[in-house]
Amino acid sequence: MSTPPEQRAVATSVKWSFVSQAGRRVTQLATTVLLARLLAPEDFGLVGMALAVIVLVDVFKDLGTTSALVQQRQVGEPLLSSIFWIQAGAGIAAAALVAALAPLAALGFGEPEVAQLVRWLAWSFVLSGLGLTHQTLLTRDLAFERLARCEIAATVAGSAAGIGAALSGWGAKSLALQTLVFWATSTTLLWWAHPWRPRAHFRWNAVKPVVGYSLNLSAYNLVNYAARNADTLLVGVLLGPQALGFYNMAYRVMLAPLHGISKVLGRVMFPYLSSLQDDDARFGRIYLRWVGGVALVTFPLMLGLVAVAEPLVLSVLGPRWEPLVPLLLILAPAGALQSIVGTVGNIYKAKAATDRLLRFGIFGTAVTVLCYGVGIRWGVAGVAAGCTVATFVLAWPNFALAFGLIDLRVGALWKVLRTPALNALAMLAAMLLAREALGLHEPAWAPLLILASVGTASYAAASLASARAAFRELWGAIRAAV
């Protein structure tokens, strides 16, 4: 039985999205490990402080127009050119605003070097704003092979620049240079990859139909910024750059595999789900397949991290990063759930319900910031615990409200997640038993590799016994893409 052309297109897109994310994440992980040995934790903390300002303004860099372009059924030349000039202008305005905020950032954190880092990173808005429309057009066309080539090349170029600068003694500035080189290379390659060129005109009538969608999404992004960065601000201001360096590194280690896997499917499924926005039954079926595939991979990764946190940190990053171990143990359960919760926003966006997304975002941010505020009394570990608590408290209402848009019950989600969750727990038990039975507590590569092998074998065995249908479907999609 032949695979329908539509499914083949999606499977091929997923394949190239995976190639892109895998290539980028492997490069970024290797770069992070090398930079962690070349730079001090304080350097990562200083950049984390600067990025807190950058991310605040980043929510406005496209004013929600990128998602609006993907969600629209039809886009014409007047809309494309008008949105290009909006994005380019927003990038320049964002850079100017960030540069103006640089002295305040240095004063607020009590670190003069933060101001220079903020001014450097401000240029990333100008560079990225010029390539957003081309990236969106490639996404709409499911042209992920071309996107993959652009993104991997840009990541390699940025990593090479950052490592070279670190070897030359640039300190924290080498991390800023890595970001700037990435965006300069990415925008240049995106213009090469897509033939569309903007025209010198702006049509308000063309933009007007997407204004409500875009403004609500921008407002949500601003609210969500508070939820995602309140922890950084609290740790940086109250506990200092070293504590923030440890906290940010813990997030990097945890989120590296999660973001890679979620984005592989997420960036493909958003345009695909947008094409199904009028068919709720099919929308729901495709969405459940999507999150089921995510859970099959992310659940064992996050629970496996609990078993290997200590040998992973000590053997890969080095002894001075030992404070990361308890942070990873606290954040791992939140990471497993976040990999699923993070898919919900695509339902709101695909159904053009960004107003509802904004309302829930305000509620969720209030709960999250409250959890951080309570947790800071116990230091960095308390803030990490606050993140985990907030993630679990907000999960059910988040799913329930989004599923109401597509007439889907939350119970249907549990049926999809139950098997990978139980299999991942069985895997964790096997890894912990092996660690105790074999005495695998040494901070060396051998215990790490043995535990990883035990985890892989036990999870594969449990999954093949209980989730054969899901693996057959996943294998069929892979074969269709090859």
Image (tube, grey):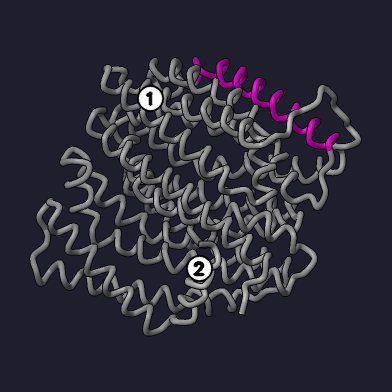
Q: Is residue 133 visible?
A: yes
Taking the image as shown, residue 310 lies to the left or right of residue 217, namely: left
| Image location (x, y in percent) of residue 453 | 22, 66
Taking the image as shown, residue 267 lies to the left or right of residue 334, namely: right
Relative height, residue 128 to residue 400 (above, below): above
> Front-most of 368 and 423?
423
> Front-most of 429 and 144?
144
Q: Magenta residues? A: 77-104
Measured Cα–Cα span from mark 1 to mark 2: 37 Å
Taking the image as shown, residue 37 lies to the left or right of residue 170, namely: left
Quadrant position of residue 155: top left
- Whether 139 is among the magenta residues is no
1 vs 2, front mark: 2
Q: Residue shown at 80%/65% (left/top)?
A: 278
Q: Label 2: few (<14), some or many (≥20) within 10 Å?
A: some
What kind of secondary structure does the magenta stretch mostly adopt? Answer: helix
* Element marked by disc 2: helix
The image's mark for residue 161 is: 1
Q: Amino acid at mark 2?
A: Arg
- Whether 80 is among the magenta residues is yes
* Element marked by disc 1: helix
Q: Residue shown at 48%/59% (left/top)?
A: 339
Q: Which residue is mark 2?
A: 479
Q: Amino acid at mark 1?
A: Ala
